[in-house]
């Protein structure tokens, strides 16, 4: 690791100020950033640790929405009675990220801000049409994810919480890479009235995306059978040493079916 | 260099460390508690697992400076004198190790597992929960047996590992 200065601000205002400094990086759970620093792939001058900001932690229900603080760990989301009751698919997704130790440190805000193309959370945020709130503004999921490791966040902008609509039937299924446990393909499905949103992670060459052909098939008939014979084009699907595009495209259909079958 | 303060295995400790010092480096190099191992150094193998404020974490992927004021338990904090912790005893009894390199992390993960999931752990639960701990010797079979037996043996302890 290159040297840096470490800061642990006690207020969001102080954190925003520090994060606005040149060459500052925000530290949430650190489970992407610290490995990145260890490999010397990044050399920030300042590291701004958000762990002291209690207001960024925890889950609560507000106006029919599950509001999850950006610094809430995966373990907390997975175990939260509120999440289990209102969006069980989201709790299940969180319970399957990495391993128990990673879930004790990794945070929802860190995952969403990083937008790793194989991370689990972006698929839930996109399929559930969640709203990402920062120190400056609120951004809908459709406007938030801009491509691999890219989001609508400006430099130094800090996610404070993510708000998920409830009363939605939803489910998640992933095919993890057997070595890394990251999603080779992960599909989050959500029923919004007669419509459906299907978000795919792990597979897109440009990060998380909505599978429109599957959404059309599920419109008015949110059942696994509605996906029979439906496929996703391999265009724009990632090919690498772990799986080629055709295989991943096929898995999207399989995982979508499993996610719908598991949805509640 | 900042001075870092923690409570490690019930004892107040302090030491200088650069901001880029990892928790595992602070534990091993500064505190000289070398039971916590570095295996992969890439957050995968779990040889470096310790408890921070009651939760099992990978100390190779945590900055020491971020643990200022924290309560840390390492493998050295489990036994009482020459009396092994029930989970350590179970690993010995069931031959849950060969070379022993992964064992401290395995045991710290197992104790955390019991703290969260209770004393009656199915084989399936144990195997799922050991996702983040890699052993290259045993094939896991005896580790799983040891964790199940250790979990039962921990019943009756006031609060596991604390």
Image: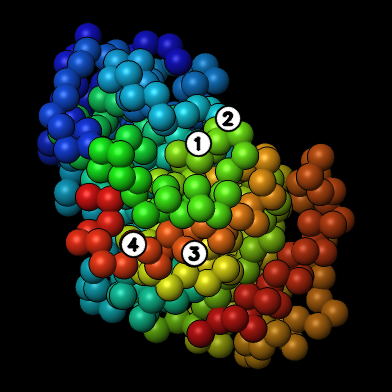
> Mark 4 falls on what kind of element?
loop
Is the C-beta separation of discs 2 and 1 under 8 Å?
yes
The residue nearer to you, when weighing B97 against A142, is B97
Q: Earlier in the sequence, mark 1 or mark 3?
A: 1
Instruction: Tell me what residue is drawn at x 50 percent, y 47 percent.
Output: B92
Confirm or deny contact between disc 4 and disc 1 (CB under 8 A): no
Residues packed near mark 3 inside 10 Å, few (<14), some (14 to 19) or many (20 plus): many
Spatial CA distance of label 3 from label 4 is: 10 Å
Whether residue B146 appears in this view of the structure is: yes
Quick check: A37 left or right of A175? left
Q: Which mark is residue A172?
A: none
Considering only order in the chain, which callout, 1 or 2, is on the residue closer to the N terminus?
Answer: 2
The residue that mark 3 highlights is B148
Is B44 placed above or below B115 here?
above
- In front of the other: label 2 or label 4? 4
Residue occupied by mark 1:
B47
Q: Position of residue A181 (x, y in %)?
A: 62, 50
Q: Which mark is residue B40?
A: 2
**Labels 2, 4: one chain:** yes
Q: Give the chain letter at badge 3.
A: B
Q: What subunit carries mark 4?
A: B
- Residue at mark 4: B154
Which label sits in the foreground, 2 or 1?
A: 1
- Judged by depth in the image, the label closer to the viewer, 4 or 1, is 4
């Amino acid at each position: 690791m290159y040297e840096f200065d470490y800061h642990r601000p006690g207020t969001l205002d102080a954190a925003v100020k520090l994060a606005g400094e040149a060459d500052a990086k925000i530290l949430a759970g650190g489970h992407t950033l610290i490995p990145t620093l260890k490999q010397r792939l990044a050399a920030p001058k300042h590291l701004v640790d958000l762990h002291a900001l209690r207001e960024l932690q925890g889950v609560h229900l507000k106006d029919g929405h599950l509001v999850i603080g950006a610094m809430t760990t995966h373990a907390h989301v997975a175990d939260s009675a509120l999440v289990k009751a209102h969006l069980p698919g989201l709790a299940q997704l969180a319970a399957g990220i990495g391993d128990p130790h990673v879930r004790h440190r990794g945070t929802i805000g860190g995952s969403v801000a990083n937008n790793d193309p194989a991370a689990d959370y972006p698929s839930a945020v996109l399929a559930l049409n969640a709203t990402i709130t920062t120190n400056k503004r609120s951004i809908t999921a459709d406007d938030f994810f801009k491509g691999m490791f890219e989001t609508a966040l400006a430099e130094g902008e800090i996610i404070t919480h993510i708000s998920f609509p409830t009363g939605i039937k939803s489910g998640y299924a992933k095919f993890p890479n057997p070595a890394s446990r990251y999603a080779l393909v992960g599909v989050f499905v959500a029923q919004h009235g007669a419509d459906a949103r299907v978000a795919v992670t792990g597979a897109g060459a440009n990060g998380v995306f909505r599978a429109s052909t599957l959404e059309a098939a599920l419109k008015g008939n949110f059942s696994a059978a509605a996906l029979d014979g439906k496929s996703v084009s391999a265009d724009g699907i990632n090919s690498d040493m772990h799986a080629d595009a055709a295989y991943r495209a096929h898995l999207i259909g399989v995982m979508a079916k499993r996610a719908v079958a598991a949805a509640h | 260099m900042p001075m870092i303060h923690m409570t490690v295995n019930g004892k107040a400790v302090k030491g200088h460390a650069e901001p880029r010092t990892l928790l595992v480096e602070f534990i091993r190099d500064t505190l000289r508690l070398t039971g916590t191992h570095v295996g992969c150094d890439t957050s995968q193998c779990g040889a470096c697992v310790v408890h921070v404020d009651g939760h099992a974490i990978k100390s190779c992927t945590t900055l020491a400076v971020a643990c200022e004021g924290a309560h840390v338990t390492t493998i050295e904090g489990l036994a009482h004198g020459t009396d092994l912790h029930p989970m350590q005893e179970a690993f010995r009894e069931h031959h849950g190790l060969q070379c022993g390199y992964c064992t401290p992390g395995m045991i710290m993960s197992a104790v955390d597992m019991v703290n969260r999931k209770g004393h009656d752990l199915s084989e399936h639960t144990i195997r799922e929960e050991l996702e983040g701990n890699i052993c290259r010797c045993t094939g896991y079979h005896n580790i799983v047996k040891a964790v199940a037996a250790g979990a039962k043996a921990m019943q009756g302890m006031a609060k596991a590992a604390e």
